[in-house]
Image (cartoon, rainbow, N blue to C red):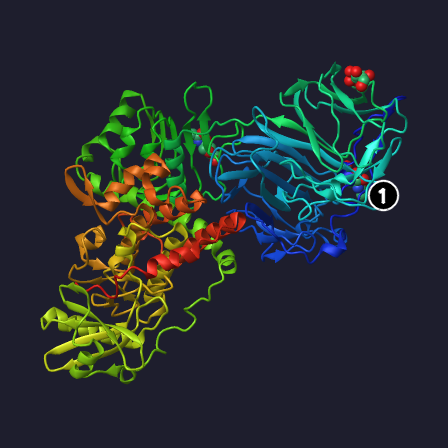
Amino acid sequence: MGFLQLIITIVFLGTTIITNITFTKAQHIHGQRQGRRLADAGDTTGFISIDCGMNTSYTDETTRLNYTPDEAYIESGMNMDILPEYKSETTMQQLINVRSFPEGNKNCYSLRPGQGKRRNYLIRAYFMYGNYDSLNEPPTFDLLLGVDVWDTVKLDNSSHIVIKEIIHTPSTDNLYVCLANTDSGTPFISGLELRLLTDSIYKRSFGSLHLLYRYYTSSTFVNSVVRYKDDAFDRMWNPAVPISGSSIETMSEVGSSNDFSLPSSVMKAALVPKSLGQSIQIYQQATDKSTTFYFFLHVAEILSLRAGQLREFNISINGVKQSKIFNPLYLQTTTIFNQEPITDSYLNITIHKTMNSTLPPILNAMELYKVKNISELSTDEADILAINNIKSFYKRMKDWQGDPCFPKGYSWSGVDCNYDSSNSTRIISLNLSSKGLTGHIAASFADLTAVQILDLSNNNLSGQIPELLTDLPFLKTLNLSVNNFTGSVPKLLLEKSAAGSLSLSMQNNSDLCSSNSCTSKKKISKTLLAHIAAFSAVLVLIVAGFIIFCIHKKKTTRMYGRPSPYHHRSGNGRRKGEFTRFSYSELTSMTKSFQRELGKGGFGVVYYGCLKDGMEVAVKMLSGTVEASEQFTTEVELLMDIRHKNLVSLVGYCEQGPTLALVYEYMAGGNLKTNLLASNSLSWKSRLQIAIDAAQGLEYLHNGCRPPVVHRDVKTANILLNKNLEAKIADFGLSKIFPDESRTHVLTRVMGTPGYLDPQYHQTERLNEKSDVYSFGVVLLELITGKAATVKMGERTGYLVQWAIPIVETGDINLILDERLQQSVENSNSVWRVIDTAMACVKPTANERPTMSLIVAGLKECLGMVIQTEQAASLPDDLAEMCLVTSTTQMAPEPR
Ligand SMILES: *[C@@H]1O[C@H](CO)[C@@H](O)[C@H](O)[C@H]1NC(C)=O
Ligand SMILES: *[C@@H]1O[C@H](CO)[C@@H](O)[C@H](O)[C@H]1NC(C)=O
Ligand SMILES: *[C@@H]1O[C@H](CO)[C@@H](O)[C@H](O)[C@H]1NC(C)=O
Ligand SMILES: *[C@@H]1O[C@H](CO)[C@@H](O)[C@H](O)[C@H]1NC(C)=O
């Protein structure tokens, strides 16, 4: 079962004067380049390697690339193994299991490359049937890229390996690769890879480049595919042995002098015709009537020419001789390609020597592509949003993936669109009959404003029929029959039905009053509908949050190597007796008579101190108010049990007469608020690290403590930095311990700081840990924007959240990102991720917000991206930053 046997086609057609090459049956990708197996992976920023159908991640033996399982990228399908008889020692690991899609007409992988849209990516998909379903019926199906059909995948037999590859520049951050059922067997996929390419190569005037073939000249039959890490972009170069021509080879390395970065192992051998008069001819018949071709010929002189020898050639394309003369450089790659697209029913490239040349032409490697037109079409955005809300609301339509309407012919099941409109493509019909839907009618139906037919029959839908449906201006057919709707039917619907402009079916809803007489009884209130709308938004968010964060969790822990602090859960902290109880005179001596004031607040003053053993501390003297002593008690009790590297630790306390004081570890870097406002500000990477530290501290309070603790006053002033810029959460004075884990919230007096306060908590006085998540979202916004939690908004002072929401919607990163970072941030995608996280945190209702665990995972992922970009650019400037922050004088727990 040769890996490349399928690719063998005749590339250079041979006739009398033409050099003809036929290709070797190359060996498997596996088993090549033994000596290199242990090479390190190198820079794989911008690589996504997915082994579809696999449950665990692993390092591929040949490329040393890390392959991840696919569950993070797709919601549907099932994992299957190919049959043992199709496995051998040399079978690529990625082919051994597949993900198969017996359900749905289109199933989509959603890739979100870290470098974002409008970059040049190579995308490659692998397929080998291996009779995984024991049906012995190799299927044929379509492969889609975004909203277009990329190609048809036709498997001829069980051992047939098909590889599809395309160079594509996506216009959206999310890139869908879908498998579409064409009624010729169940679609499946074995592997999927994405590789970031340099933007300056494989340029084309439009569309994407679908690979026809990529060969290098090989002098022996035993060579095999060259790919990563020889090829930094992981292009797969297949060996080709000339038959009627001959190959010459050099022992020297061939430099990659251009951006195409050809591996030396690919350029070392070259094809030359046997006699001087012969030319090299490359011929490719188009599959369609007219195809647009792009070719890339890579040449390098590999013989050291003697005086008087000259190798010079020019090229004819489809009979037109090009004026340029090529003169390959010694051991340097030159890439010859067409700058203008060549559109014809065939491509005929002839490489012939010039009059003066004393040597025949030469060719080391070549690539041929055809242009795949990629449309930027997509369904109307409001419709996409609405239908996704409906999807998340009912959670039944797992096969709704990718774009709802595109490609044409592959719309979601039950969805019909109007494609003829010159404007945007709208959803005009939605048939959810017999989908097992439960609950009420999602408010988002009313946002599908072009819909004409809505069929919800044969489900278990209940509740009232919302007035909102009357807002659909083009609704002609509404089928609500066989459900459990109650209440009355909106009057307007009945009127439209009576007037004949709406075909309304409602039979078999036992408790539905469908006569005009009872319509006035009970109308569904606008508020309820608003809640419904909010609820469906919540679900979307939860689903999205899950996909974005959960998924990356495994990857993150690997990528980001700081030791995880929370393996020890609560209960193993020091006992109360282990805190030092200080006397008033000890306080006086440690603070040198309260000499250096670090800060002042509502509850008292904080002083700098130094213990006898040299340990630096911050001493918070509490004023004698009731609140102060309350705070004292809460804090001492809490800190007794809670220890975490991202929570400021209590060293001791003083309770003597009227004196109440808390002694903390000293945080030399001061609080985050001051650091952010300082003129020499923190780098993006430091900010991310601080965000992770603080998030971990909160995560520990929420999940590591029994019972869980809500901080209640998360803000930048309560995030302190030590001299190494590690952040810790301070000030537990307001923290509330959940009295009982089974309860999800506690009613409590509203406290906290304006600008950070969870609006829902504010209104309802119901506290849960999502209130901290809200405040943490504000902290993230401060880290991103460099602004304070309250900002000037024209005349008045507003909250940062209100300021940020419309600006984030503009999508202009320069309006959001701290001006001081704009030059230095190299990975703007990491900024977007943090913005998205912040926006999720400050959602109005608690359910919509992610948990701290998800946030920690997401932030670590972002830091990983930044570190990778940085390593790629190798510009370590961290040392400078640390000096800068340690030298600022601000410090420890800011009192209120
Ligand atoms: C399977 O199909 C491929 C491609 O059509 C063909 O080259 C190969 O010989 C076939 N193998 C077997 C075992 O039939
Ligand atoms: C390709 O072009 C060359 C020279 O322009 C010509 O001699 C040859 O016949 C052409 N080949 C085919 C198959 O059309
Ligand atoms: C061939 O070489 C001669 C002498 O060096 C030069 O004058 C002439 O222009 C060359 N012809 C071409 C086609 O390059
Ligand atoms: C909706 O689909 C069902 C089958 O699933 C079909 O019977 C019904 O006629 C469709 N409704 C409309 C309005 O086309």
Disc 1 secondary structure class: loop
Give above or below for 368 relative to 55.
above
For the point 59% across and 36% down, the residue is 181
Q: How many marks?
A: 1
In the picture of the structure, the residue carrying the numbered disc 1 is: 221
> On the rendered structure, is 398 left or right of 296?
left
Residue 134, horizontal then vertical, whole percent: 70, 49
- In the displayed structure, would residue 479 be above or below residue 496? below
Residue 742 visible at all = no
**Which quadrant: the C terminus?**
bottom left
- Residue 93: image location, x then y, percent: 68, 53
What is the three-letter code of the residue carrying label 1? Phe
Relative to 655, residue 760 above or below: above
Q: Position of residue 97 (x, y in %)?
A: 65, 52
Ligand 3 sits in quadrant: top right
Task: Using residue 525 as the reference point, say whether residue 435 is left or right of it.
Answer: right
